[in-house]
Amino acid sequence: MTIEMPYQPLPVDQSDVRYIHGPDSALQPGVPAGETVELEWRGSEVYPGTFRKFWVHVPAQYDPAEPASLMVFQDGWWYLDPAGEVRGAIVLDNLIHRGDIPVTIGVFVDPGVFPDAENPKNRNNEYDAFDDRYVTFLLTEIIPQVAERCTIAQSPERWGICGGSSGGNCAFTAAWLRPDKFRRVIGYLSSFAQMPDGNPYPDLISRVPRKPLRIFMQGGHRDLPGMSHSGTGSPKTCAWQPLSLKRATTSALSWETADTAPTTAASCCRTLCAGCGGPTSIDRYTHHPTWRRLR
């Protein structure tokens, strides 16, 4: 079903423009709040010398006797911040309360830093690499700490991973290399163009057997131009590569895409949970001259 809305052009200058949050991004009367625990991790073997924080959000409906689904967010605090743009824990609480998604443990992981180093950030080293270090880090160092506190479902159909910009291609790479663990992916404005040796996926995916991944990828036509690690870039780079990736690999993976401005976190979660214990109908909203609801 298509719902047509009056056309409203975007202003040329968007320096003072922000998208209005939907109801799922706000605390709602009668919705019990889950509990969020902050943890620190200094003992990484995959990324020696790094320090990071991560947060585990346990919904009020969680029952230790019933294994919960798992959703991992890169750039953890940015996605968790209750006063920020995503408000991940609030969204999860609202969707779980309404039954739109199964009971899901949210794990919000910050990128590592090297304390006291001149260049402390390790984000791009972790997120942009085309190798299994980051997903190994999650599986051997972070998720075991979550499993000590919560009963997590073991089916990869109930494990998801989410990120934006470099965190988006990080999420894709984690699921691509370990589909035996992660089979649900959300990528916002993924920075495939920043991968050190270039984006391997349009060529790679078309040459390998189909993988059991379900992916929601959003690309914005007003995204910033990107510069690769070699120092080159083009006005289309970051916005275009996620969409060209989708076009190159439609036959190899299962996709839901939104081309333009930010899609709500709630819509993405509902999309990915179709077929994994959540609803089978899919809602998708995009900020576009014609807003669409697809079922």
Image (cartoon, grey):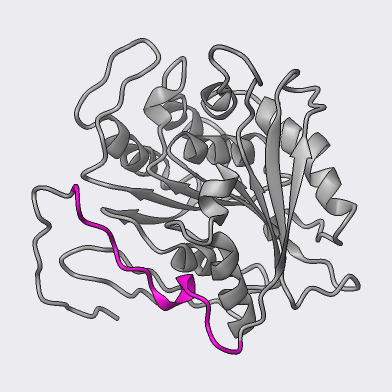
- Residue 173, magenta (yes or no): no
Name the residue rendered at 18%, 69% in the picture. 290
Identify the main secondary structure in magenta: loop
Residue 250, image x and y in percent?
Answer: 41, 47
Residue 289 sits in quarter: bottom left
Q: Residue at x 60, y 33 (%)?
A: 111
- Is residue 214 visible to the viewer in this orientation of the structure? no
Residue 238: x and y in percent read 31, 33
Q: Residue at x 86, y 52 (%)?
A: 147
**x, y (%) of residue 292?**
28, 72
Front residue of this view, candidates 244 and 218? 218
Q: Quadrant of residue 176?
A: top right
Q: Which residues are magenta?
A: 15-30
Query: Is residue 103 shown left or right of residue 184?
Result: right
**Residue that lies at the very extreme toward the bottom in this rendered image:** 30
- Please indicate whether residue 284 sits to the left or right of residue 117 in the image: left
Query: How many numbered discs, if any?
Result: 0
Query: Is 253 rendered above or below residue 273?
Result: above
Q: Nearer the viewer, residue 43 or 270?
A: 43
Residue 88 visible in image: yes
Q: Name the side, left or right, on which 33 lies relative to 154.
A: left
User: Which residue is at a point 47% across and 75% down the rendered structure image?
Assistant: 24
